[in-house]
Image (cartoon, helix red, strand yellow):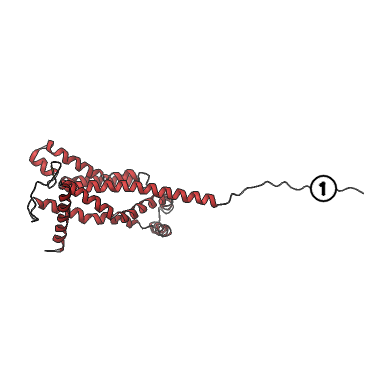
Amino acid sequence: MGAWDMFLQAIFTVIQWFHSLVGDWGLAILMITLVFRILIYPITRKQFKTTYKMQKLQPQIKVINEKYADDPQRKQQEMQKLYQEAKFNPLSGCLPTILQMPIFMALFRVLRDLSTEKFDNGVNGPYTFFGLDITVSAKDVFADAGILATLPYALLLLLFASSMLVPLLINRQAENQKQMRIMMIIMCGFMLFVGWQSNAGVLLYWDLSSYIGVAQQFASRALLKRKDDKQEEAIIDVTPVKVEVDRKERKARPRKKN
């Protein structure tokens, strides 16, 4: 058994253990998602700090873009200088997404292979979440049972796609808002295409994971902003107040004539 197959077996074993606790395969996936988001929170917290700092740097980035619009090399140098002074790394926000991709891919494979009985653990179906088969996709249900039977799966699919649009709403004040909107719309369409062919269990994982991340981001932004406000208040309190006093010119006294 290769390393990837061992990883898939481990994912299934964890799902099976949670299923033994709650008695529902979909709830087991949701519990795995919650535990995983808690475990990676220290990393996602750094991502939220990166996003927040990026928003604070937007006015300076705008000035650099306008000032060096005709000099790409100088603009890149000034951007690097700005990032170094602010101790900002744009790539640090990608790590949580990278960490989730193996879980996402493994769930896809595990849920697909459940119906083929690849995992020999004495477990028999049905693999359901409140009556929904988590091993099938919206595409499969639509082909077999028609549009009405597909509606519950379509709801999971829409939540899956909208998880890409929520960050746009959160960062709507970004300087490159137009470009970001276009990118997010393209990504939303791509996620719809991927989600249409993904198992319902995978959509459950991604839906909950994405919206937990959104809630964490809102909370982190509020805490970071409160911290900044307190620091600004402290600076104002410490800085002495300068009072300008208009001094009257001293007039020369008249001298007595002898």
From where the camera sits, is residue 197 visible? Answer: no
Q: Is residue 216 left or right of residue 136?
A: right
Residue that sits furthest to the front in the current view: 21
Q: Is residue 147 left or right of residue 170?
A: left
Determine whether, in the image, residue 249 is placed left or right of residue 20. right
Measuring 19% from the left and 43% from the top, which residue is drawn there? 157
Which x, y percent locates residue 166? 29, 44
Q: Position of residue 80 (x, y in %)?
A: 39, 59
Q: Which residue is more in the foreground, 245 or 31?
A: 31
Residue 106 x/y as whole percent: 17, 55
Name which residue lies at 29% across and 48% down. Answer: 213
Q: Nearer the viewer, residue 20 or 169?
A: 20
Count of numbered badges drawn on the protein: 1
Quarter of the image with the N terminus in it? bottom left
Instruction: Please give the name of the residue rendered at 20% of the width and 53% of the height, measured from the top-left corner.
Output: 104
Q: Residue furthest top?
A: 148
Q: Is residue 208 something that shows in the picture?
A: yes
Q: Residue at x 24, y 46 (%)?
A: 208
Q: Secondary structure at mark 1?
A: loop
Q: Nearer the viewer, residue 47 or 165?
A: 47
- Mark 1 lies on residue: 253
Residue 61, image x, y percentages: 41, 52
Q: Amino acid at mark 1?
A: Arg
